[in-house]
Image (tube, grey):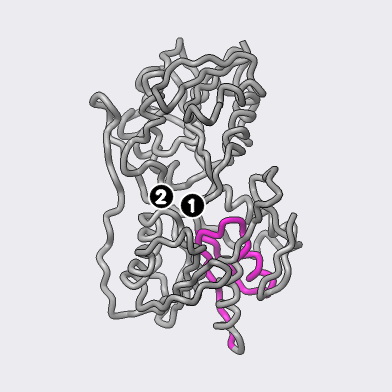
Amino acid sequence: MQRCDTSFGSLRLDRYPPTRNPTLQPFDAADLYLLQEQARLSEGSATGSVLVVNDQFGTLACALALTGIPVMSWGDSHLAERALQDNLRHNQLSAQAVTFVDSQRLPNGPISHVLLRIPKSLALLEDQLSRLRPLLSADAVVIAGAMLKHLPPSAGDLLARYVGPYQASLAWKKARLLTARFDSDLTPAIPQLDTRYALPEGGPQLTNLPGVFSRDRLDIGTRVMLPCIPPTAGPARIVDLGCGNGALGIQAALLNPQAQLSFIDESYAAVTSARQNFTAACPGRDACFTVSDGLVDAEAASADLVLCNPPFHQQQVIGDEIALRLFQQSRTTLAPNGALLVVGNRHLAYHVKLRRFFSQVEQVGGNSKFVVLRASQS
């Protein structure tokens, strides 16, 4: 737990999932800068509800909630949603103080104040701004912020296209703000941001919503893993863990007509994409689609095969902590004779890390950069 002093009061905050790295904070200078600017704009005047977008660990929403301001939080990450819930509780704030709205729904308008963390994906930013514009009031102000090293040069162009003229702030502690005011004369076209490509060897087409991992092309790890997915006997229970657009699970479904498939991801857009793609590739067939923190809510011994191309970053932080959590969760979720099939860069040494959780680890595929491993207890 770390103390965070904001323009609206002090908070006690933690990251979610918890981290072993004590240097990682649940907030940064961009969060503090956004709150400073919101406090300046609202000084001496009543502030209506505020929409925060892409709030990584709930810092923005919790700070605003300290003042009793109605707050909505809009984002794609279930991990961020859980962080928000935890940090509201850490600060004795009601769970109802902030309304979370996932990326596949729209917040209630009209909205006059927006604090937006600029995401890594420009397609996601454009999607959010284009969907947000019809909800903005005539006097709306959108304040977008990011650390300088993560600020895309064209973010301001998108604000100008979908909101109105913007001004860039001076840098403060390596953070910058872009403040845009609503221009009612703008008539931006609705962007077509979905992407499509096919699985290899004449496989089905996959559609990707903005913000989904590997939305422009099939990533190399998934491509290497696809031929390693085995046919199984009978109605096996197969989980595509961290499913993204559902490529691995759909391939498993095509190879295993009697299997029961489950698709799980922390991204609402990813699970929606996987659902759309599975329905198109396997018409009339049922599957389970879940937005969750991996397998944390799964029943023990409820899966026979888990497929996983684990992420190696959360926001801009690179590391193996999320992968290790997924490996541990998989061990608990697998039936006694079940197996985890995982792909990763060779330099990540997953063959060593998997042995913390599984007695048997063998290589079943790979190329010069990636390796596919099968882990089991027997």
- SS label for mark 1: loop
Q: Residue at x 27, y 62 (%)?
A: 190
Task: Identify the magenta region.
Answer: 45-74
Q: Quadrant of residue 47?
A: bottom right
Q: Residue at x 38, y 78 (%)?
A: 182
Q: Pinpoint residue 78: horizontal percent, then vertical percent.
A: 55, 48
Q: Residue at x 49, y 36 (%)?
A: 242
Say which mark, if any, is on residue 76.
1
Can you identify the residue that label 2 sits on?
Answer: 211
Q: Earlier in the sequence, mark 1 or mark 2?
A: 1
Q: Quadrant of residue 201?
A: top left
Q: Amino acid at mark 1?
A: Asp
Asked whether 52 falls inside the magenta stretch, the response is yes
Q: Pinpoint residue 355: horizontal percent, then vertical percent.
A: 63, 20
Neighbor class of circle 1 (other Cα within 10 Å; few <14, some 14-19, many 20+) is many
Q: Amino acid at mark 2?
A: Gly
